[in-house]
Image (cartoon, helix red, strand yellow):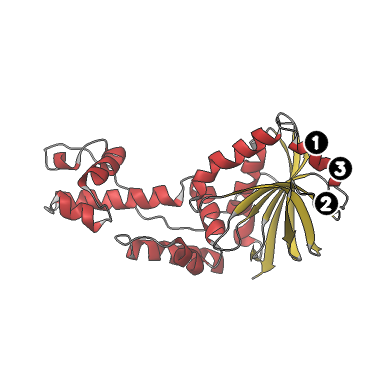
């Protein structure tokens, strides 16, 4: 329950500061997690990126302000748009009309009420997981920087995997895999507020060759979920973890990377695990 309360406190903060430049670090601190984990939880629970939600709330309120007689230029400035052109573009993308048309009779606009979270218990499909404690270990592989707006990374990560599948990276990594953590790893190292990176890697005790990057994964408690299916099944499992398991689990996110373990990376018949770093509430 405390976790849901913190999420709603974060949403209240967004609403109270909707006309300001939104600082995701402040929002995530109120939610009690990193900016990465907050954005990830939000998109899994709402199916809308946080940046899109904020834009829709601004445009919803802007429509009311214009209907109440405020000038378009004043409303644009109020919601943080430096030029009328940028505001007009954002407004039209939401309402399908220009803000200058708002006072015409019969105009239809869209309202996007504030989001409020609550626990919903489904339990219609089982989830297999185990809780393990693991000492620190090393991964090696290739890495790429991630954007602070989570949705932008939905293009970066698939491109990385596509490149690795064709340029020989994966066969070059596999001989280094010599620990009990078997499988090809997708690691989101975003627990710091700066230097977000994504790794395609393996766990190893061997020396790191020059062509690969390395990352030390800290000692941590992990909630490990297993799954199988087509290449989209892992995202569906991650969404269920956030929506269905985490709120009532007695755990919350710990300050460590998230790990996807691909035991069989066949996109049509994958077997995988999702490792979530957790601490007791």
Residue 175 is marked as 3
Query: Label 1's element?
Result: helix
Measured along the vertical axis of the image, is residue 22 above or below residue 109? below
Q: Residue at x 42, y 61 (%)?
A: 11
Mark positioned earlier in the residue sequence (1 or 2): 1
Q: Which residue of the protein is positioned furthest toward the front in this rendering?
A: 210
Tell me whether circle 1 and circle 2 mark residues in contact (CB < 8 Å).
no
Q: From the image, state whether disc 1 or disc 2 is nearer to you.
A: 1
In the rendered view, does 204 fall on the left or right side of 279? right
Mark positioned earlier in the residue sequence (2 or 3): 3
Crowd rating for badge 1 (residues with CA inside 10 Å; few <14, some 14–19, many 20+): few
Residue 107 place in picture, x, y as percent: 18, 37
Quarter in which the C terminus is drawn: bottom right
Crowd rating for badge 3 (residues with CA inside 10 Å; few <14, some 14–19, many 20+): few
In the rendered view, does 15 fall on the left or right side of 246? left
In the rendered view, does 26 fall on the left or right side of 34? left
- What whole-number distance in Å separates the C-alpha atoms at marks 1 and 2? 17 Å
Task: Identify the image quadrant of residue 269.
Answer: top right
Q: Mark 1 = which residue?
A: 171
Residue 253 place in picture, x, y as percent: 63, 63
Q: Mark 2 = which residue?
A: 181
- What whole-number distance in Å separates the C-alpha atoms at marks 2 and 3? 13 Å
- What whole-number distance in Å separates the C-alpha atoms at marks 1 and 3? 8 Å
Q: Residue at x 15, y 41 (%)?
A: 100
Near-viewer residue (42 or 126): 42
Q: Residue at x 35, y 49 (%)?
A: 55
């Amino acid at each position: 329950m405390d976790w849901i309360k913190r999420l709603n406190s974060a949403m209240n903060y967004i609403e109270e500061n909707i006309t300001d430049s939104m600082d995701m670090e402040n929002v995530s601190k109120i939610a009690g997690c990193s900016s990465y984990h907050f954005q990830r939880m939000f998109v899994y629970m709402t199916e809308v990126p946080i940046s899109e939600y904020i834009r829709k709330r601004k445009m919803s309120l802007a429509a009311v302000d214009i209907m109440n007689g405020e000038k378009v230029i004043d409303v644009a400035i109020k919601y943080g748009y430096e030029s009328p052109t940028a505001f007009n573009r954002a407004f039209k993308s939401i309402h399908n009309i220009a803000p200058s048309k708002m006072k015409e009779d019969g105009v239809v606009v869209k309202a996007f009420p504030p989001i409020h979270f609550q626990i919903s218990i489904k339990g219609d499909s089982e989830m297999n997981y185990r809780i393990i404690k693991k000492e620190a270990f090393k991964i090696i592989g290739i890495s790429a920087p991630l954007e602070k707006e989570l949705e932008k990374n939905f293009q970066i990560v698939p491109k990385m995997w596509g490149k690795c599948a064709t340029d020989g990276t994966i066969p070059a990594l596999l001989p280094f895999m010599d620990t009990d953590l078997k499988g090809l790893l997708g690691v989101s190292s975003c627990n710091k507020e700066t230097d977000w990176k994504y790794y395609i890697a393996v766990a190893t005790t061997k020396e790191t060759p020059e062509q690969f990057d390395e990352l030390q994964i800290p000692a941590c408690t992990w909630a490990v979920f297993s799954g199988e299916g087509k290449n989209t099944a892992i995202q569906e499992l991650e969404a269920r973890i956030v929506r269905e398991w985490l709120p009532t689990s007695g755990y919350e996110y710990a300050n460590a990377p998230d790990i996807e373990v691909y035991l069989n990376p066949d996109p049509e018949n994958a077997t995988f695990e999702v490792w979530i770093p957790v601490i007791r509430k």
